[in-house]
Image (tube, rainbow, N blue to C red):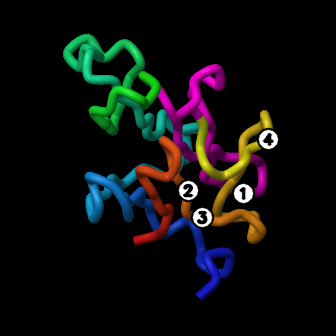
Amino acid sequence: MNFNNIDKGILDPILKCIQGDYTGRFIQFDNCTSKQNETTGIIIGGKPEYDLKKNEKKINLFIQDPTIDESHVRFFCRKYKNQTLFIVKDLSNHNNFNSGVHVQLPSSDVDLLTYDYLDREFTILNRKYKFVISKV
């Protein structure tokens, strides 16, 4: 079934690790409510020395890896006038060799569920961790 044929209003998206140390684990993120234009979403980040108690970068999904950026990628919901989109945004430091998200993204936000030409699977850290966005 094509995700574009599914009504986004009744389903919540999940982010699931399908390759790497966290294979099979997933986290659900929220749709925008009627009073929200954008959700906080999920921020993936890490670094072993990152202070999770302070959590200054507001990381939701911590991957303890010395090569990941403190805040690497963000997934969130944004409501527009006629539709609600699920967005992925690269937050990584592009001066770092391991930075980035393996789907080449423009500088603007990209909705992975609307654009058929984009693969809904993506990787970080040179394909060490692979994730997929799907609906439940």
Q: CA distance from mark 3 to mark 2?
A: 6 Å
Q: Are marks 1 and 4 in contact (CB under 8 Å)?
A: no
Residue 109 location, quadrant: top right
Q: Which residue is mark 4?
A: 106
Q: Earlier in the sequence, mark 2 or mark 1?
A: 1
Check whether the beta carbons of the residues at disc 3 and disc 2 lie within 8 A of each other: yes
The residue stretch that appears in magenta: 71-99
User: Residue type at mark 1?
Assistant: Gln
Task: Locate residue 29, reporting x and y percent.
Answer: 41, 50
Q: Residue 112: where, in percent of width, then height?
A: 65, 58
Determine which residue is flagged by label 1. 83
Which one is earlier in the sequence, the residue at label 1 or at label 3?
1
Q: In the rendered image, which quarter is residue 58 located in?
A: top left
Reply yes or no: does residue 88 show up in magenta. yes
Residue positioned 66% across, 53% down in the render: 85
Residue in view at x 48 percent, y 62 percent: 132
